[in-house]
Image (cartoon, rainbow, N blue to C red):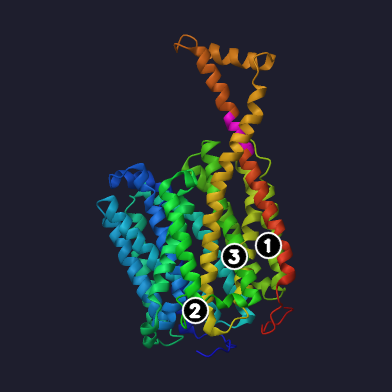
Amino acid sequence: MSDERVSEMPSLRQKIGFVAVMLGMFMAILDIQIVASSLNEIQAGVSATPDEISWVQTAYLIAEIIMIPLSGMLTRWLSTHLTFVISCVAFTVASIGCALAQTIDQLIIMRAVQGFVGGAMIPIAYAISFKLFPLRVMGAVQAVIGMIATTAPSIGPTLGGYITQHASWHWLFLMNVVPGVLASAGVWFYLRIDKPDFSLFKRIDFLGLLYLALFLGPLEYILEEGPGDEWFDSTFILMLSMLCACSALGFFARAFRVTLPIVDLRVFRDRNFAIGASLGFIIGIALYGMVYLMPLFLGTVRGFNSFQIGQLMFVTGASMFFSAPVIGRLSDKVDARYMLAAGLVMVGVGSMMNANLTDQADFNQFMWPQMVRGVGLLMCLLTASRIAMGTLPNSEISNAAGLFNVLRNLGGAVGLAFMDTIRDIRVDYHWAQLIPAIDTNRAVVLEELTKAQLAVTGALSDPAAVAIKQIADRVMVQAQVLAFNDLFLWIGAMYACALPLMFFIRKAQNEDTGGAH
């Protein structure tokens, strides 16, 4: 295709192909989180240890983040539709392999394959949208993509728990077979937007590819496992960090020296893309961070089960689903910079609305903040991608889409790692602040200790020690609540601090919208 952006709507055949692409993208994003609430059942099914079972998610994420930036090179070499079809077919086969796995090693390998090939479908979906549709309708198109990208992680654990409860964990993967076949066939028969260039294979920078894999793979592992291993207190994390740093230097050096780099970083010269991709990183922190923080609070502090947590998390997905058509149409008429600013404000305010939680917080305290955050996240995601790639020529779209998505995923990984670390630090801080108040010279403390002691007298050998532990547990719960409040407040403040970036975004000159843009 030429570098000129399309001005005509796609044909019916192309629209069918695009729907197939969206189906494949949904599967790839959904499978990141769909195993989250079923790890205990999977662990029993493949006789894994608690340490081993975490790799069911980690292997997927590491493989995915390596593939995402490679998608641009693959689409230039194999063509967009062929790359997508190969990825989708391989994803479907790997899903069957996951379901048939008898050991944890087999499952981890299949999950890594699943994540690697699935990682290509996500940026390709973004790239196809910009190559296929004129900019005047891009708001509605990006709203659909944004809705998929934001709701799939939100409903993943809930859907996975439901399937496991009513069928078995094997169906978490077997459910991909029919959609995988439909998506592959739809793209193969209905979507052709460019041609392959097989001569590029001889010019692929395989050394750069190795550096990229050794940079992003260990980085994702460090961010996933670092908080639990106390970061650099672990020799393995320290060695991986050194490998990651050296590989990063090699990757960046080759990216600017070779004629055809494995990932073209020169796209960051475009100011809008650089700012849009940076905002994608920030969006990833809330997109994945909130999906992590809320279930953690509800499970550890409130003691909710997975079904109750799923009911609460559904509010975010529902608010995104019902607001997507309105936001999409509105973004075609309103300057994307204003829409993005409004989205950042809504995510920030929605986060701060949860900064005064108590140990009795339930659905009522979470419903409105979730709705505000959900709508805001959707606005941020669709406008950030539009700002990042809306002014680029067609030849740079595929590469840019990969970089945009890898930064969003890295934002999520970095956010989760630091949330875990900061939460531990703040729990210790609030514990130290609260525990001096537990003084036996205070009448209220003595009264509570006496009541707790009397409740277990005769049933246990040391009621005094049990009473003290019960009081300590109550203090710990309050320290945890305060730590969660700190995180919600700081996430909100981070989004407020991102607002000044709006002043540096260049207004797109080539958008053929009918309204102000």
Residue 341 or 411: which is nearer the viewer?
411
Q: Which residue is mark 2?
A: 257
Q: What type is the residue that disc 2 sits on? A: Arg
Q: Position of residue 453 (x, y in %)?
A: 54, 13
Q: Residue furthest top?
A: 458
Which is closer to the viewer, label 1 or label 3? 3
Q: Position of residue 506 (x, y in %)?
A: 71, 76
Circle 1/circle 3 CB separation < 8 Å: no
The local secondary structure at tag 3 comes to: helix
Displayed quadrant of residue 344: bottom right
Q: Position of residue 481 (x, y in %)?
A: 61, 37
Q: Which residues are magenta?
A: 476-482
Among the two numbered marks 1 and 3 on one chain, the one whose residue lies closer to the N terminus: 3
Residue 67 or 165: which is nearer the viewer?
67
Label placed on residue 280: 3
Q: Which residue is mark 1?
A: 343
- Going by the image, does 341 lie left or right of 297? right
- Residue visible at 64% across and 36% down in the picture: 358
- Going by the image, does 482 lie left or right of 240? right
Q: Residue furthest left?
A: 102
